[in-house]
Image: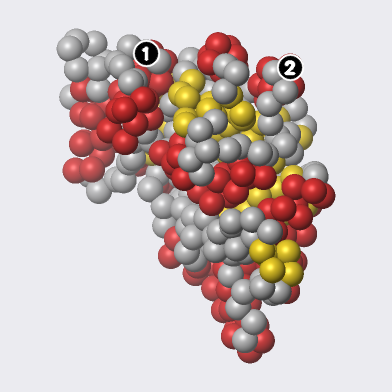
Amino acid sequence: MLDLRAQFAAIGKEIRAAIERVLVSQHFVLGPELEALEREIAHYCQRRFAVGVASGTDAIALGLRACGVEPGDEVIVPAFTFVATAGAVSAIGARPVFADSEPDTLNVDPKSVEALITARTSAVVAVHLYGRTANMEPLLEVATRHGLPLVEDNAQSLGATYRGRKAGSFGTVAATSFYPSKNLGAYGDGGMIVTDSEEMSTRLNALRNHGQTGRYVSIEPGFNSRLDEIQAAVLRIKLRHLDRWIALRRTHAAKYTEHLESLEGVRTPQMGPEHSCYLYTIRIASTGPNPAARRDHVARHLTEMGIGTSVFYPVPLHLQPLYAALGGKPGQLPVAERAAHEVLSLPLYPEMSTAQVDCVADAIVEALKG
């Protein structure tokens, strides 16, 4: 699915120099590398402020706290995403409420979101899935009309755009992840929150550091969630390459589509210049009693050929055992449930060769003929 060794081979000299700079400084937490990265990420995301934290999950949780979400509140999140989105809601004592997806993009459906708003709703989280932004205009309209903060979960789509604006530039706050597999990945965990609100930025800086506003003076319960200097230094190097890497991903994605778009029962993703191409995810429909049979057959065939694939995500959040107590039932969110049976993500990374893309596509064609 991903070859980080190939990436390191290309930029290793720059990375080693950046890490050496931190080692010489012996400044490892809340230092100049993080301050510089925060400025650079804020500029990249077209925001005024950025606050580095320990993970993408913490970025969502702290962002929700800064937006005023309290224990017992309801927060609307998409059902078709990674569990961390809802887990961040649970971590601060709030209750996730699961919305369905749009059939074409699999991003959260604004109509489903609006139907779930109650007097207990205190925020909406929009995930930008696979590298494509959610449908932000109607989501912002719904959130504004109901007086709710909109939090962008931009863990998968840093570098994507929506109508000329960068993903992460729309919500009250936006959270991103620097998990190593991301388009901009650290050498460990890491995350960032961006916002245009100076007040939010000030509070987030306190929340990530035990609620402190001065040395050993805390004004509220906070987290120990600080992006360290080594990770910040690595990310600053990688950020310089990000747009070039995304362009290469787009080239490979277009090649995949050229091979696969005419296959019967296969739906290729809608990808274009606004997409950051984090994942290339096809949908393989099945007939018969097992809705995932054809998808799983293709995945097994590729595995036998030494080709990595992944299913993001096989169980929508309303059907996860973790959230069984919330009463989610099969059939409740049909678009998300169908997607879970059909999606298959293919290898996609900048250092892939055209021959590798052709090999994967040919293997899919072969599997579907078998």
Residue occupying image coordinates x 49% and y 60%: 189
- Using residue 204 as the reference point, say whether residue 87 is left or right of it: left
Q: Which residue is mark 2?
A: 145
Pick whichever of labels 1 and 2 is earlier in the sequence: 2
Tell me the quadrant of the picture where the C terminus can be found.
top left
Residue occupying image coordinates x 66% and y 31%: 150
Q: Which residue is mark 1?
A: 332
Between circles 1 and 2, the one closer to the viewer is: 2
**Residue 42 seen in the current view:** no
Relative to residue 29, is residue 281 depicted above or below? Answer: above
Mark 1 crowdedness (10 Å alpha carbons): few <14, some 14-19, many ≥20: some
Disc 1 residue type (three-letter): Gln
**Residue 109 seen in the current view:** yes
Q: In the image shown, does 107 or 347 lie closer to the viewer?
A: 107
- Using residue 204 as the reference point, say whether residue 313 is left or right of it: left
Disc 2 residue type (three-letter): Arg
Task: Quadrant for residue 22, please give it.
Answer: bottom right
Q: Position of residue 24 (x, y in %)?
A: 63, 89
- Using residue 234 as the reference point, say whether residue 281 is left or right of it: left
Q: Position of residue 343 (x, y in %)?
A: 37, 28
